[in-house]
Amino acid sequence: LAKTTQPISMDSYEGQEVNITCSHNNIATNDYITWYQQFPSQGPRFIIQGYKTKVTNEVASLFIPADRKSSTLSLPRVSLSDTAVYYCLVGDDTGTASKLTFGTGTRLQVTL
Amino acid sequence: DGGITQSPKYLFRKEGQNVTLSCEQNLNHDAMYWYRQDPGQGLRLIYYSQIVNDFQKGDIAEGYSVSREKKESFPLTVTSAQKNPTAFYLCASSVWTGQDSPLHFGNGTRLTVT
């Protein structure tokens, strides 16, 4: 099972760009990299997913180097409402969502 | 709006009682999942279903049971055999069970057993 390592917590000021890096040294050829955001007492929300290179949507960018052993979630100009836990998920080469593992994530605290 | 509805938001039970958590989705998704989250922890998979009338055990299925009689419904029963049932329970769905199909979560049911 491909495991991920990400910082336990990060702090940022409002308006700054935040980059959260996730290590996944054992990522398999078929695995995607997926990020979710979770607010207290709510279910996680899908943010972004990528396989290689760079992916960008309206809320975030995902940078994936050529070796795919790590990935970086970039949140531009964060606001207080971005305070949440962010999970990086990588599968285990079976290609199924049922094999995704949610670790403890990165707790991002945004302040004024 | 399409989404996943979990009810109730809070549930209290006495030890020794079975309790059923509701999960309904109107996203027309084939796959549905149940996760458990303990304080400060990540999510752990209890059961999942790829299609109606089919379900598979996840990592921590002991003490739980599910059914999938309708595409839109995937209720979870927490039985008295579950040793530590107090937790935050999350239901999710996806188009299919492939990794490239993002999970859509409900807002959870917080179960307290005393």
Image (spheres, coloured by chain):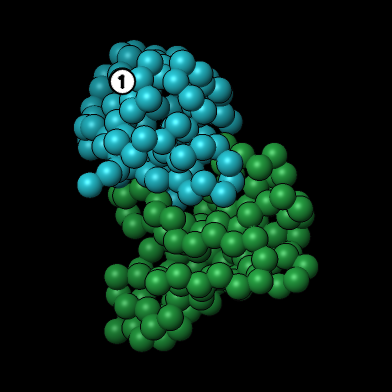
Chain colours: A green, B cyan
Residue at the front extreme of this rendering: B28
Q: Where is residue B4 in the image (x, y as percent from the top left)?
A: 30, 39
Residue A53 image-quadrant placement: bottom right
Residue B108's spot in the image, x, y percent? Answer: 31, 40
In the picture, measured across the screen, residue A112 lies left or right of residue B105, that is left
Q: Viewer-proximal residue, B45 or A50? A: A50
- Residue at 58% in and 31% down: B59
Q: Percent from the top left, x then y, of residue A47?
A: 44, 61
Q: Residue at x 58, y 41 (%)?
A: B98
In the picture shown, does residue A98 fall above or below B113? below
Q: Is residue A94 visible?
A: yes
Q: Mark 1 points at which residue?
A: B20
Residue B110 visible at all:
no
User: Which chain's residue wears label 1?
Assistant: B
Foreground residue among A48 and B1: B1
Q: In this view, does A98 lie above or below A29?
A: above
Which image quarter: residue B10?
Answer: top left
Residue at image x 33%, y 28%? Answer: B72
Q: Is residue B13 left or right of residue A67?
A: left
